[in-house]
Each structure stands twice: as structure tokens, then as C-alpha cells.
Image: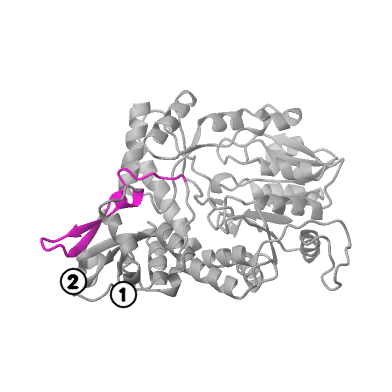
Amino acid sequence: MSLSIAEALPIGDGAPEEGDDFVCSTSESLIAAIEKCLDNGLGTCLVIGEKRHVVGRISLDDIGKAVLDGALLNPTLDQHIEKFSHRLHNDSSVDKDVLQPVLDASGRLIGIDIDRTSQHIQVARPDMSHREFRSVLDAFLSSWISSKGPYVDKFEQEFRAFIGTGHGIAVSNGTVALHLALLALGVGPGDEVIVPDLTFAATINAVLFCGATPVIVDVDRHTWGMSLAGVQQATTPRTKAIIPVHLYGRPAEIGPIAAFAAKRGIGVVEDCAEAHGARYAGRPLGQFGDVACFSFYANKIVTTGEGGMCLTNSAELAKAIRLLRDHGMTPNRSYWHERVGYNYRITNLQAAIGYSQLWRIEEVLDRNKDIADAYQAALKGIPGVKFPPPMDSACEPVVWLASAQVPAAKRDQLLLAAHEAKIEMRPFFHSLSTLPPYEKYARVCPNSLELSATGINLPTSRAVDDQVIDRIVKVFRNVLG
């Protein structure tokens, strides 16, 4: 992808204007360079001197090392350019190949070229901007770096409002969110909890943490989540809770499942780790269960690095989850423990990132959908490639990672070929029934087995453009014909 002078740079001989995120002037500060490297998604910028001559390039790695040596005490780039100028011609790093200057005959910068034809492409990458950077600096400089800082409350309030629930309790990760939800519902030894066979292991592990018995059910081949029929068949007098998982952003049959559970006094814990912003029957996922659990791991739609949240409309459940999250201590009586609890708190630094991520969640969701649509158009007609089945009108899925299915006999070959082409792809999760720790709970789940054997996740991030899609198409054609 090439950008002309009009697209990438202002006209004239002055310093780059705000928004020219691929180019820094030697008169600009290191902080400005950091923010541009973040906002352009490449993590690197060209550096220009007088009359727009390129004098070097700078990356976030460079700046990080320089900051450790005290570079912020000499804040403008011209005071550090000797460290970076050699990289223009003597650099073997990936970013040199991605961001290239376009020069006129006199050596002045007239445009830039973004060349991803040989860049290593990850399946997912945290999407950070200047907003997150500024919020983390604010949290750090406030000295509130533990779980007591103001960003924790801000993040809880903003995210619960985004989903539309009464209470939000931020925690250290998505797995402990599930654990706390089950504990707050009173799940323990002797109880059964229904879980889908195709999910990340955290879902079933949370049940085992409580000493309860997981009851595995197959997923529906169209939604990729558990169905009402499967839940009904698995329900017994010992069923205490159900954990529907909205796998890869696709809503499970949550409305009917929640209604069925409510009539029988069974708790519902929605596992929304991969479905931020998805909807069912016009309502956001996370509104249907007694408790909804979200993950903010580094590859999720909203990230805090590690982190999670429990959402609920029940003041009683929210109070119990907060108590359990913080060692079981009573909030208004120092060091008084009402029950055995856990240290499952999130930090103010993590919450600062998540709070700022929420400003851009719609942008990320739109981008991911566009990437998935582009894959479908580009890979259409390649033998054996299938895409996620259309969902009925009640379901409004989101794209966490763009997904496809390929012939099981060819999948490992495809993953290897992609790796050799410097493109990371991931297989779907293993069926829980095939994993050694859960052998005693295994069930025959043909839909889960098929999806697990054929499913593949494709790169889904700002790095994916037409060049990257062309590279992926080439890999698919070479392997599948």
C-alpha cells in the first residue's frame, strides 16, 4: 500500500501535522513519536529533518530502550537521532521492510510505502493507541497502581453500561470471573454444571474449582454453541448451573436456555469471553444470565492484557462476587473476613487500558467484520473451504477471530505452510471430551469433534490488508488446490 505526499504528509516544508502518524520530525518529542508509532499500528515511524530529508526511522522498541537510559530527560528526537539514523540502511528488522520512504530525485520524502509482503503476521495483536498510553501514564503517575485506583471503578461503570447491566465487578482474568460467578450461585460438591464440549478449558476448569461435576453436551453445528435441546437432555435434579459459551463471537441459543433455566431454578453463567458486543433478540449478550463473564486477555476484542469482569443485574450476587474477589473481607470493616475468599482483583493500570479501549470498541468490531468479509470473498471457491454458517435473525454475532473450516486431513499441512510463509493461524479448541484431564466426564459429541478437527482461525488485526489476504490465499491454494 502506497500513500502519496498528500495522504501522508502536509504540503510545504514544515513539520508533520497532527494525524501524519507515519512520519516524525527531528523537532518532535519522544512522547509524540511513541503516540504516532502506536496510532499507525506499525510500531515504527520515519524521521525527517530539514527539507523533508529522511534521516532515520524509530520504533517503539528503540524508544523503550532509550527511555530506560534516561532519554526523556532530552525529549526531542534531534538529540537522539544518532542512535536511529543508522537503521535507515543497516537494519534487518521486519519494520524496515514494512514502512518504506518514497523519495524524489533530491532525496525529499514525497510519500510512504507500506509493504507487508514478507511481514510476520500474528493471528491477533493487541490494538493500542495514544488513549491507552495516556491513561496508563495517568494511572502510574497517580501512584494508584493496585486495585484501589479510580480506573477500576471507571472501567466497571463504562463496561456494564456498554452491555446494559446493573453491576460490573472487574477481576484479574476471565477464568476467575467464571469461578466467582459459580461460587456466588452456591455451586459446590454434589452439584452438576452443564458445559459445552467445544470451548476453552477455562469453562470446565471453573466448575472443577468449585468441586462440582461438569456435564458435557455437544454443540449445535450451526451456532457452534450449546442448544436448548442439548441442555434439556443433560438436565438432572442435581443440575445447579448452565454455562452457555458464545464461541468465537457467535451467540448460543441463550434466550430459550435462560428461560428454561429460570423455570427450574437453575443458574445461568454466560461465558462471553469471545463475544463483546454480540446480540441475541436485540439484546447484548451478557444480559441473559444470572451472571455474565467476560475476558480481557491480550487477544480479545477489549483487552487489559490480563483481566475479566462479572456482570449481573442482581445486587445480592454483585455483593457476593465483590466479597469473594477481595479475600472475603467486609468492605466497611477493616480485615474482617466474612468467609473464605480469593485475591482475584484487577489493578488500576490494567483497568486504565480497558477503560480507554472502550472508546474504540465499535471501530474494532467493524474492522474485524470487514476482515472476515474480505476473507470470504477472497477464499471463495477454493476446494474444501467453508465459512461460519449464517445465523438466524435473532442472532447478531461479532467477529473475534475470523474463522473457516478446511478438510481435516489437510489442516495441519495448511497450518505448517502458513507458518513457513510467516503467517500465524490457529486451530479451533480441542473437544473437551478428548482431553486427558476431563476423560471421566467425556461424552460422544460428533459436532464438536468435527468443528475441532476442521476449524481454523485466521489473522484478525490491523495488520491484515489486501497484501496479507493475497498471501493467505496463496497458502490456501497451494495446499488445497
- In the shown orientation, is residue 218 left or right of residue 74? right
User: Whole-percent x and y of residue 139?
Assistant: 59, 71
- 451 is within the stretch colored magenta: no
Give x and y (percent) for residue 439.
73, 28
- Mark 2: give few (<14), some (14-19) or many (20+) Cα within 10 Å: some
Q: Is residue 167 above or below residue 437?
A: below
Q: Is residue 354 above or below residue 92?
A: below
Q: Is residue 83 left or right of residue 414?
A: left
- Tell me the residue that label 1 is attached to: 27
Establish if 83 lies above or below 213: below
* Direction top: furthest residue: 409
- Measuring from the top left, give residue 57's x and y in whole percent: 31, 60
Instruction: In the rendered structure, find residue 51 and report the number of the disc placed on it.
Output: 2
Q: Which residues are magenta?
A: 94-123
> What kind of residue is marked 1?
Ser
Residue type of the residue flagged with mark 2: Lys
